[in-house]
Amino acid sequence: MACSGCYSVNFMAVSSNPNKPLTSSTLLTSKLSSSYSQIPFSSLKFNSKLSPIQLRISKSAPNSFVVVSGIKAEPLKVMISGAPASGKGTQCELITKKYDLVHIAAGDLLRAEVAAGTENGRRAKEYMEKGQLVPDEIVVTMVKERLSQPDSKEKGWLLDGYPRSSSQATALKGFGFEPHIFILLEVPEEILVDRVVGRRLDPVTGKIYHLKYSPPETEEIAARLTQRFDDTEEKVKLRLLTHNKNVEAVLSMYEDVTVRVDGSLSKEDVFTQIDTALRNVLGQRQAPIGSVAM
Ligand code: AP5
């Protein structure tokens, strides 16, 4: 629509859903009134319904300005989910190495409580041994406290194995923690049992091994490997039942940002899919999304 004395700006907003990039039908139009022409356009910010927008003067073309989204983007916030032994921990090692996020694994936090012999750890172990979810009053506070630490706020976080129920997801939303992306690792059940029984952990480095798929590099490492108390075929079947009972409820709360990944491939190929999804999210949040002549 013609507008005398206005700048008419057409730009594409950034989709918050990595699965659904915006199309031309969702093009956003904004009218900047003539009063804006009185101020230097070094930086003008406003919010669209979809994402924060920032306009900046383009150095290469001073008579135009560039529409940028998420220029000072907050750190990346990632959730990773999947059945027991779907490869969450393995992929988290690779993700943190590349993206330097703070890795927060609900299972690791619980095992640390068990090892420290705290009251929470003693209670948690009863549930972990049965493959059941540890009650919210123990897990929710523990995860919230870790997410609230300065390093998680500054570097961003990678939340592994939480939330596992709609009540946990609701609690997290209530505290203001929302992910940019929710990665779901999909692996057929027959592969999961094989992965669980062959899994070993290095207590010195924390690295995850598998006797067949990812064997230790040296004899020295092989000699010190340990096995988790819940890594038996019998217990993984119970953990799987718990997972299957809750997964849909959790997914329904993160539909908009969910990316499904084929977790049955080699760990390198699984990571390639995740890496692509993360780069898409970062790109959508930081890339210039249009420009206009003044
Ligand atoms: P948790 O420790 O989170 O266990 P889990 O969900 O059962 O998942 P895992 O740690 O067993 O597997 P993973 O997906 O990390 O796989 P990994 O990379 O190690 O939770 C344990 C318990 O704590 C729960 O049962 C519950 O009681 C409690 N709990 C945790 N979170 C809770 C919460 N939010 N609320 C309430 N209770 C909670 O890989 C497995 C093996 O496969 C390894 O040997 C690895 O080398 C191998 N592998 C990985 N990827 C590949 C690949 N692509 N190809 C071949 N091998 C691979």
Image (tube, helix red, strand yellow):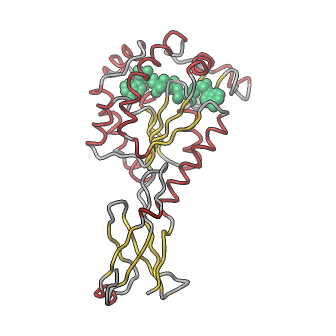
Q: Vertically, is 22 above or below 96?
A: below
Image quadrant in which you'd find residue 182: top left
Q: Is residue 213 left or right of residue 97?
A: right
Q: Position of residue 4 (x, y in %)?
A: 31, 89
Residue sitting farthest toward the front = 1
Kindly tell me whether residue 115 is visible in this rendering: no
Residue at x 55%, y 48% (from the top left corner): 277
Q: Taking 265 as reference, is 135 left or right?
A: left
Classify 233 as above or below 267: above
Compared to 110, does 147 lie above or below?
below
Nearest to the observer: residue 19 or residue 232? 19
Percent of width and height locating residue 158 = 46, 42
Which corner quadrant holds the C terminus? bottom left
5 over 156 or under it: above or below: below
Front one among 112 and 74: 74
Report the number of discs. Answer: 0
Q: Is residue 27 visible?
A: yes
Location of residue 97 in the rendering, given as x and y in whole percent from the top left corner: 58, 45
Looking at the rendering, which quadrant does residue 67 occupy?
bottom left
What residue do we see at 44% from left, 27% from top?
A: 107
Quadrant (top left, top right, bottom left, bottom right) of the N terminus: bottom left
Q: Where residue 244 sits in the image (x, y, percent)?
A: 43, 22
Taking the spot 43% from the left edge, 48% from the top edge, the residue there is: 77
